[in-house]
Amino acid sequence: MKSAHVGLWLHVLSTAAVLVSAFDPFTTTVVVGVGAALSISIYNYLHENCDPRWIVFNATGLEASLQTKLFGQHIASHIILKAVSGFVSNDNPKKPLVLSLHGWTGTGKNYVSSLIAESIYKEGMDSKFVHVFTSELHFPHASQMDTYKTQLQQWIKGNVSSCAQSMFIFDEMDKMHPGLIDSIKPYLDYYDKVDGVSYRRAIFIFLSNAGGENIIQTTLDFWNAGRNREEMELKDLETSLSLSVFNNKRSGLWHTSLIDKNLVDFFVPFLPLEYRHVLQCAEAAMEARGLKPDPAVADKVARDLVYFPKSERVFSVKGCKTIDSKLDFYT
């Protein structure tokens, strides 16, 4: 369909070019102007822009993805769907949406970020309006922290100036230098504009292992008490989680004013995954490869992982992180 549209545009342009030679100078100027306008239209059609053709929220799609692709995270799924849907549907939000996702590796934090991006941007994570920062890649040297702060401020301001609906993902927050995130506090606060730029429609997502021990302990307590993990609610984790993150000296959110000033909208806990969830991950990974899900193979993959506590083997140490490499061995 897209190629047909492009062909039509090219035909219109070529026709305009032929007509140019037949007109007087004034008419030629008009026709050339029309041609230029058409060229701009073609460019805008083919290249991503900050407009509703490229940025439109699909609430139904996000809900379906969370239900069918994210396993063992009933709390995170509920919070994220409500938070993102409420924020994007609000024509006049009072501040940017700030989500802080916490939990051990392999539990779905990065994956959820991609699901959110796919529900908002036509190009998903490949959108030029989605920006990912990784601590060890973008901010590796503690001695250059002042430079990083200035660069980060300029980068965010420049991108939000170009598109108010920009998304910023900060990965490995637990490895980020404490204080760096505070440099962007004004952009996350309840300000109408900062230096002439409004940040109210932007989304900031922080990913961190910090607080993971607290989440695991609470989940273990539920399991030891014979309670179903689906009974757990945000209130069982949120206060202790935010405090443990705030007091974690190794975290980019250590004693940050973002927490102190309540600028993080939701601390989202990602629970440790059980064997049954790893099975679901393995079958989903097979399906993503175009293979028919094989329960026997999924079982071999799941049993090959390390679980804790050692005696009961309840929770996967690495969640679903190594599923793909295990599948390469068993398929």
Image (tube, rainbow, N blue to C red):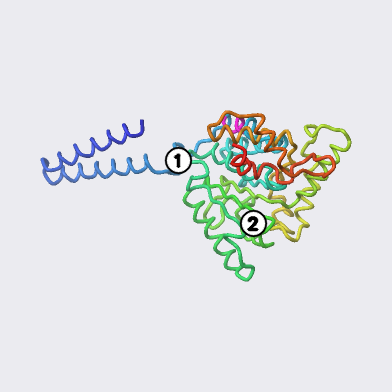
Give the residues in magenta: 61-65
Q: Could you tell me residue 145's position as x and y percent?
A: 62, 67
Q: Could you tell me residue 302's position as x and y percent?
A: 70, 37
Q: Could you tell me residue 8's position as x and y percent?
A: 27, 33
Helix, strand or loop at mark 1: loop
The image shows residue 149, relative to residue 317, as above or below, that is below
- Identity, as a three-letter code, of the amino acid under mark 2: Lys
Q: Earlier in the sequence, mark 2 or mark 1?
A: 1
Q: Quadrant of residue 10?
A: top left
Q: Name the quadrant of the N terminus.
A: top left
Residue 51 is labelled as 1
In the image, what residue occupies the spot 61% across and 47% down?
96
Residue closest to the eye, 194 or 98: 98
The image shows residue 180, relative to residue 116, as above or below, that is below
Q: Name the quadrant of the C terminus.
A: top right
Q: Which residue appears farthest toward the right when viewing the image?
A: 225
Residue closest to the eye, 98 or 317: 317
Residue 185 is labelled as 2
